[in-house]
Amino acid sequence: MKQIRNNLFPIIAAMIWGSAFVAQSIGADYLPPFAFNAVRSCVATLALLVMVVVFSKLRKEPILPPKEQRKPLLIGGLCCGGVLACASALQQAGLGETDPGKAGFITALYIVLVPIASLFFKKRPPLTIWGAIAIAAAGLYFLCIDPTEAFAILPSDLLLIGCAICFTAHIMVIDYFTQKVDGIKLSLMQFFFVALFSGILMLFFEQPDWSLLPHCTIPLLYTGVLSSGVAYTLQILAQKDANPSVVSLLMSLESVFAVLAGLLFGDRMSGWEWLGCGLMLIAVVIAQLPPLTKSKK
């Protein structure tokens, strides 16, 4: 069961995030970044609140956590929510000025940053994971970038680099707190703070036209309930007792599912994109291999 949770949940989350890209793009046409993230996070908070109540009744346990878990739950929600709010805002702002494929590649560079960050927490990934990460990074490049065109870092790309750093921090913070508190309740507190921080920033920096809200109801519900509420909760549950480098690698399949989702809308995949998908698949298979160990004499 643990193996299924650690491997299947991130893939399902990646499928949801990949298909949610269209919904995010539509929503960005009607609401600015902070307003969009505030509303979708409010939707996610309400959906997760219902989920917490239902699961508590099924488990026959109190809705409120025990006293000894309330403080770490509050701190965990604050830390995870703060980092996720920064990552989401930087991603949404960067998408407005950068090619979507290039944005997806830069954002997904967290698969390289996570194992590097893990070294500072004395969680050294095995050699097989480093090999899988190198192959996945190459796959993401072919999947998101046309190799025949020149690749240059623009000022707007710096926002997405900051987004990748924030997502790396988000994965590492979740890895710490998911060992201490209930995963679903942590996700609930996380999105409560994302909604709070995004709402405050919206009041200071944006003037959204709320009359346009009905035009993006479906994108907000999809990204709020599925992309935020369900997918990020699956990430938290998957990271419990799991290697964060492996989980980040599986979640990077979001780019593959985004391209495959485009096929449903009439897009065609180039040979480079097929090569990228193939490399990503090889990387995932390698990540599941047992770690290489030195033979004992």
Image (tube, rainbow, N blue to C red):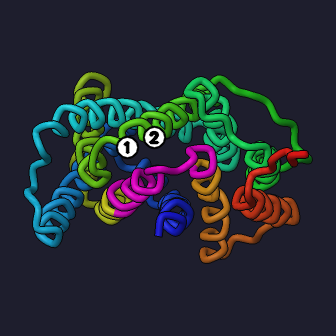
Disc 2, SS? helix
Taking the spot 36% from the left edge, 61% from the top edge, the residue there is: 230
Q: Residue at (60%, 34%) from the top-left corner? A: 123
Along the viewing direction, whichever of 237 and 11 lies nearer the viewer: 237
Residue corresponding to mark 2:
175
Residue 51 position within the rendered picture, expressed as x and y whole percent measured from the top left: 21, 64
- Report which residue position mark 1 lands on: 179
Q: Is residue 231 magenta?
A: yes
Q: Which residues are drawn in magenta? A: 226-247
Q: Residue 178's quadrant in the figure?
A: top left
Vertical comparison of 248 with 167: above or below: below
At which x and y percent is residue 78? 28, 31
Q: Amino acid at mark 2?
A: Asp
Closer to us: 204 or 40 = 40
Do the CB atoms of the residues marked 1 and 2 lie less than 8 Å apart? yes
Q: Main secondary structure of the magenta part?
A: helix
How would you rate the neighbour count of disc 2 (Cα within 10 Å): few for under 14, some for 14-19, many for 20 or more?
Answer: many
| Quarter of the image where the C terminus is located | top right
